[in-house]
Image (spheres, rainbow, N blue to C red):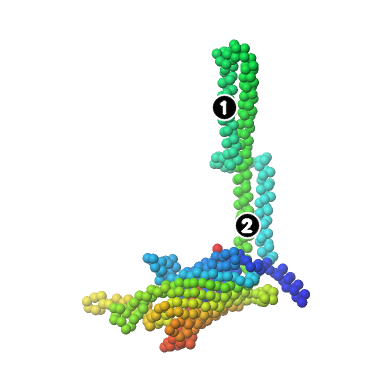
Amino acid sequence: MMKTQIYLCLILLLNFDSLLSQNINKEEYSRALSYFATGNSFNSVGNYAALSTANNTLSASFYFLDDNSGMYTIDVQAGASQGIATLFDQGELNSNVQLGFSYRWAFGEKFVGYDAVTRSKLHRKIETAEEEYILKQIELLNTIENPKLTAKEKKELKVFIDGTKTFPKGSIDIALNKEKLKKFKKINDLYIKISNDLNNNDGLAAILKSKGDVDNYVEAEKIRTALKAKRDQLIKQIKANNASDKKNRKKKAMYVINNEKLIDEMNIKKKAAKKSLDALKPLAVHLNFLSFGYKARNNNFIRFIESSDSANQLKPINYIAHNFNVSYNFITNVKNFANNNFNVATYKYLSIGANLTYSDNQSSLEQVEVVDTRFVDSGNSRTVTKTQKAFLGDYQEDLAGVNLFVDYYSFFSKNSNFAAIHINPTIDFKENQKPVANVQLGLLIPFSKKKDQKSVVNVEIFYRFKDVFNTMDANNTLLNRSIVGLQTSFPFNF
């Protein structure tokens, strides 16, 4: 038993760099989700755009994570022929547009495992780039104290200094010099005044001498001497500061120019390592979600009322259907997570849930083509034909219902970028209607980039059996009620 535990620990240490905790960041979620069938399932997770020929829709999903392993998702879906750009038209929800919001909570222990050796090397490249920058920065600071510049470097330095009015430190030096110049001017003006008075027979000196006020004369001389000394000191300081400011500006310019080059060099190395890290495929994933959501869909179609007169047989219908959903989602390629067996198996994705609906019965109506023909000449030899799709049957609104579904993907290989089988049975219980069961079988083929093996597009060929037990008493056979189609999704990270 002890050997088995040690063996399992060694497997984890040697093979996986894992994130086994209550919190996995958005980057890890997004990277893990991009490697399996996002966009094709009924209740998908992840970022994706998807196109389906099953119901002629174009859809997109975006999610955001909070700090408590919660995922907020926004879903947009519309008729593929109309696109998803025009969601509202004259204040009303556009035809066949669906907007959805959901909250997914990842509960229990979550596991995303990577190749520890490869991941460690990539992290080390990022750290090395930062360490190299620090060493080169120190070297740069030492170099600029005694610069030996080439003619080209001197020219580059001059252009930089000329193009920069001042640096922060230079601004302080200049401000201090201006204050000293103001003080110097006041002292100098006073010095000149006293000097003039002492040397002027009509001034202060003559008055003081004539009165025999020797003490005041001597005091005035002392003041003048002190002012001269202060003035000379300020002159020296101003000259020194001007020289220092010029030297500092030159040093700072040299530092800024070369430091920017070092930063660019470091960022290039870090970006390359980060790109490789982002493209690193998870070896093992084990995630559980509970999902709660709401969707509103605008069912916009033409109803064909066979019993009405020809002028009133085509009636436009515009109805907002509501959908509240709850589901359990499970993603794994770990053999036995409960028993700490993290050996890689084939990817599996399972979603089980229910939709509580308040809608109409458009889906149970028969789709027909209505052809209008009119003559455009007097001889009735030329006609213009207009064809449009309409729905025939007993149309009802405000019907409560429940839709139960199972959505299951199983990949054929441990490499999740290989083909997968998709099984999606559903059963609808709707007011005033018999239960209707549908089953979709599909083959999912992800296409990926050659270098990083990240899924670029998922293509699914499917066969949908509608109303398997013919509870709607249709006249055509099961095969004639079925749909063969293609749907694609484009997983992405941001």
Q: Camera-side residue: 404 or 466? A: 404
State the residue at coordinates (60%, 48%): 260
350 relative position to 466: left or right = right
Question: Which of the pair 237/294 is nearer the observer?
Answer: 294
Amino acid at circle 1: Lys
Q: Quadrant of residue 225?
A: top right
Q: Is residue 458 above or below residue 173?
A: below
Q: Position of residue 68 (x, y in %)?
A: 60, 66
Residue 183: image x %, image y %? 58, 29
Q: Residue lying furthest top in this view? A: 210
**Which residue: 63% across, 26% down?**
230
- In this view of the protein, can residue 484 be seen by the observer? no
Callout 1: few (<14), some (14-19), or many (20+) C-alpha neighbours within 10 Å? few
Question: Is residue 46 placed above or below 237 in the rendered structure?
Answer: below
Count of numbered labels shown in the rendering: 2
Give the structural element (helix, strand or loop) at label 1: helix
Q: Nearer the viewer, residue 178 or 323?
A: 323
Q: Which quadrant holds the N terminus?
A: bottom right
Secondary structure beneath disc 2?
A: helix
Tell me how far mark 1 sits from mark 2, CA to CA. Answer: 58 Å
Residue ID at (60%, 14%): 208
What residue is pinned by disc 2?
270
| Residue 129 vs residue 333, the one in the foreground | 333
Nearer the N terminus, badge 1 or badge 2?
Answer: 1
The quarter in which the C terminus is drawn is bottom right
| Left or right of 435 in this view: 70 | right
What residue appears at the point 43 percent right and 84 percent down from the top-left corner?
432
Q: Residues within 10 Å of mark 2 (few under 14, many from 20)?
A: many
Task: Tell me which amino acid carries mark 2.
Answer: Lys
Disc on res. 186: 1
